[in-house]
């Protein structure tokens, strides 16, 4: 299932693997050495972690999949659930032989579930998994997202996702909802007029919101079951991130049997992303290098 070789200027090669239901999962490979898999979260794709992968590539073979529903990977498909994402990551781990995994947000949920159900992961670094201590919170967000997407109100769904996850500047989230929707709609229309980039456009990412929200619903609530994880776990977070994400890290730190916690001062939920998307991947790469080495 290998793809045609990339142009020489690309710092990676591409390949793909079939998940257990036949869905194609495309991934990029950087560098050489022990294997590390990077699993992106919501509102992003593999390209958002290009700089993080490059920062690790001198010491590791870094594999960065596009999760299903994005870029060259296959669709979400019928019966989507956390189990589908588990099977996708299992397939990547089996093909690459990697035993070290880093997951962000909803990607962190996937890493937690695979670490719980499989012995393939030796070390798991997790950046602010999208866990809520009260499952009713993400359930309400998902219901509203579904209504808005079914009505074709993409801007409204994006605002619901932003407010529900408490992402974006607080001053922006405080604006009246109708004004926010107008601003997002204008941003999407402006983006539609520009040539495509390697980042997925906002309009395409909006279609992934309800699936990431579904993962949060499935995984939130009962955190005690993660006490059975036997992999070494590094919990990561930013000092400027939402309170509920810090609470989830606190709760996980109480139940995981072999765990270490690091907080990045002055950083937020998007710290691992490329710099042109507001990230600061160098300090994240430094901690990952220490942990995976």
Image (tube, grey):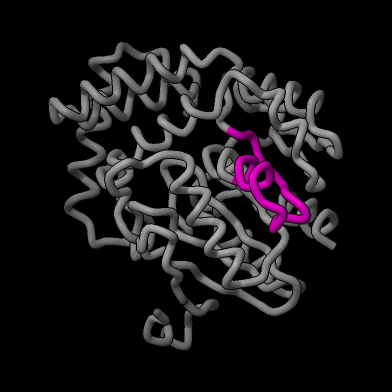
Q: Is residue 266 magenta?
A: no
Point out the image quarter for the N terminus.
bottom left
Q: What percent of the width, then of the height, locates residue 189? A: 18, 42
Query: Which residues are the magenta region?
Result: 111-129
Point out the image quarter for the C terminus.
bottom right
Say if 78 sits above or below 227 in the image: below
Residue 280 shows in this picture: no
Say if 155 sits above or below 71 in the image: above
Residue at 55% in and 54% down: 274
**As rendered, which of 221 and 177 lies closer to the eye?**
221
Q: What percent of the width, then of the height, locates residue 128? A: 64, 34
Judged left or right of residue 136, residue 223 is right
Residue at 60% in and 74% down: 30
**As rendered, which of 176 and 202 lies closer to the eye?**
202
Q: What percent of the width, then of the height, locates residue 232? A: 82, 47
Judged left or right of residue 263, residue 10 is left
Judged left or right of residue 250, residue 213 is left
Q: What percent of the width, then of the height, locates residue 219? A: 54, 29
Residue 56 shows in this picture: yes
């Amino acid at each position: 299932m290998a793809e045609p070789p990339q142009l020489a200027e690309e710092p990676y090669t591409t390949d793909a693997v079939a998940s257990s239901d036949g869905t194609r999962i495309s991934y990029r490979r950087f560098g050489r050495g022990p294997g590390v898999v990077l699993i992106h979260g919501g509102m992003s794709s593999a390209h958002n972690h290009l700089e993080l992968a490059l920062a690790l590539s001198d010491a590791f073979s870094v594999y960065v999949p596009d999760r299903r529903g994005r870029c060259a990977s296959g669709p979400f498909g019928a019966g989507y659930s956390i189990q589908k994402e588990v099977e996708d990551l299992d397939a990547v781990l089996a093909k690459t032989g990697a035993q070290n995994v880093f997951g962000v947000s909803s990607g962190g949920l996937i890493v937690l579930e695979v670490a719980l159900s499989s012995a393939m992961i030796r070390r798991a670094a997790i950046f602010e998994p999208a866990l809520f201590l009260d499952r009713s919170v993400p359930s309400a967000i998902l219901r509203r997202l579904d209504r808005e997407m079914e009505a074709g109100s993409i801007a409204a769904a994006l605002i619901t996702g932003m407010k529900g996850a408490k992402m974006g500047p607080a001053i922006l989230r405080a604006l009246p909802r109708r004004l926010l929707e107008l601003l997002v709609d204008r941003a999407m229309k402006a983006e539609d007029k520009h040539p495509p980039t390697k980042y997925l456009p906002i309009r395409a990412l909006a279609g992934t919101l309800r699936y990431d929200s579904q993962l949060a619903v499935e995984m939130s609530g009962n955190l005690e079951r993660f006490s059975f994880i036997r992999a070494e776990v590094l919990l990561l977070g930013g000092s400027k991130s939402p309170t509920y994400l810090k609470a989830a890290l606190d709760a996980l730190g109480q139940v995981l049997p072999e765990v270490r916690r690091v907080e990045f001062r002055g950083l937020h939920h998007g710290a691992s992303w490329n710099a042109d998307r507001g990230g600061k991947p160098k300090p994240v790469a430094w901690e990952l290098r220490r942990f995976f080495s």
